[in-house]
């Protein structure tokens, strides 16, 4: 698998997303996957607000808000994240960028436009953001929208090297692609909001066969999340935690 990050001009609030991508791509081949940062999608939708309204908008954008010493832990349509995904980096002073709207529709539309532009039959789109993972340091790329490929590879009932059959295992293809792309795109001043993922081991979907992906494909409801049992416990020890015992 090859990942090619694409350095571009600065994307500004209100710019047309397809025109920008069309003018930035060196080339696109059949069976490529284009990674697009959510930040330029949000800017194209003018999802920008003043920093003074941050607390109000975080609450407005969230289904549940939990204050912490590091910010608000929020539950949104994309699952748990910090401050409802609102980002102050790489935007004008005293402003902040919100998460984009209708992400799956954006991915589907981009795919249709780029297939026509590049004259290809099979093409994937993954819209990326970053996330933190409980009890792990740093951030990782994640997919918040996609189109054109199967988002999971199932290992259910497939024998492993010793003949054991998995009951639950699915490989999250969409998030894996996003994490790989974000590593090359960067999260600072790299000015690489696009990346082409080439020769990825994915199953592409045909237009006539594909059901429209939904945001619920990638997230669990809280009551179905296996980790809820951990955080329901009153106390637990972290690795390396000092105790009095």
Image (tube, helix red, strand yellow):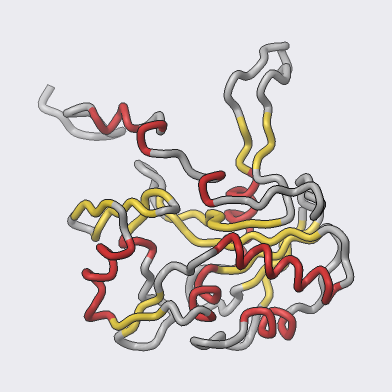
**View extreme (left): residue:** 244
Residue 62: image quadrant is bottom left
Q: Residue at x 42, y 53 (%)?
A: 77
Residue 37: image quadrant is bottom right
Asked whether 212 or 65 is in front, the reply is: 212
Q: Residue at x 23, y 58 (%)?
A: 70
Residue 197: image quadrant is bottom right
Q: Quadrant of the image for the C terminus?
A: top left
Please, is residue 117 above or below residue 238 in the view?
below
Relative placement, left or right, of 135 versus 9 is left
Relative placement, left or right, of 18 versus 220 is right
Please, is residue 97 above or below residue 239 in the view?
below
Please, is residue 217 above or below residue 30 in the view?
above
Please state the horizontal and vertical placement of residue 34, each as a whole percent of the image: 71, 65
Q: Residue at x 66, y 84 (%)?
A: 20
Asked whether 234 or 127 is in front, the reply is: 127
Please state the horizontal and vertical placement of residue 27, each as a whole percent of the image: 82, 75
**View extreme (top): residue:** 163
Relative placement, left or right, of 193 versus 98 is right
Q: Residue at x 36, y 43 (%)?
A: 134
Q: Is residue 201 at least partly visible in the picture?
A: no
Please state the horizontal and vertical placement of residue 98, each as a whole percent of the image: 40, 71
Please state the horizontal and vertical placement of residue 130, each as a whole percent of the image: 47, 59
Q: Is residue 227 at least partly visible in the picture?
A: yes
Report the label total. Answer: 0
């Amino acid at each position: 698998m090859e990942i090619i990050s694409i350095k571009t001009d600065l994307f500004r609030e209100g710019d047309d997303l397809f025109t920008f991508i069309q003018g930035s791509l060196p080339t696109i081949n059949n069976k490529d996957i284009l990674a697009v940062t959510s930040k330029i999608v949000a800017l194209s939708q003018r999802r920008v607000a003043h920093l003074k309204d941050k607390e109000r908008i975080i609450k407005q954008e969230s289904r549940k808000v939990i204050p912490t010493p590091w910010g608000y832990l929020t539950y949104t349509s994309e699952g748990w994240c910090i401050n409802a995904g609102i980002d102050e980096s790489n935007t004008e002073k005293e402003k902040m960028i919100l998460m984009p709207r209708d992400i799956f529709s954006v991915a589907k539309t981009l795919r249709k436009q780029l297939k026509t532009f590049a004259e290809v039959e099979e093409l994937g789109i993954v819209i990326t953001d970053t996330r933190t993972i409980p009890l792990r340091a740093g951030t990782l790329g994640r997919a918040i929208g996609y189109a054109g490929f199967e988002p999971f590879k199932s290992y259910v009932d497939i024998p492993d090297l010793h003949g054991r059959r998995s009951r639950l295992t699915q490989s999250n293809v969409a998030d894996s692609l996003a994490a790989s792309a974000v590593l090359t795109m960067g999260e600072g001043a790299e000015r690489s909001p696009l990346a082409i993922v080439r020769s990825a081991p994915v199953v592409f979907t045909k237009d006539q066969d594909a059901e429209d992906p939904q945001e619920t494909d990638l997230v669990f409801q809280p009551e179905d999340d296996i980790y809820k049992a951990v955080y329901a416990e009153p106390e637990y020890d972290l690795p390396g935690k000092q105790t009095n015992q």
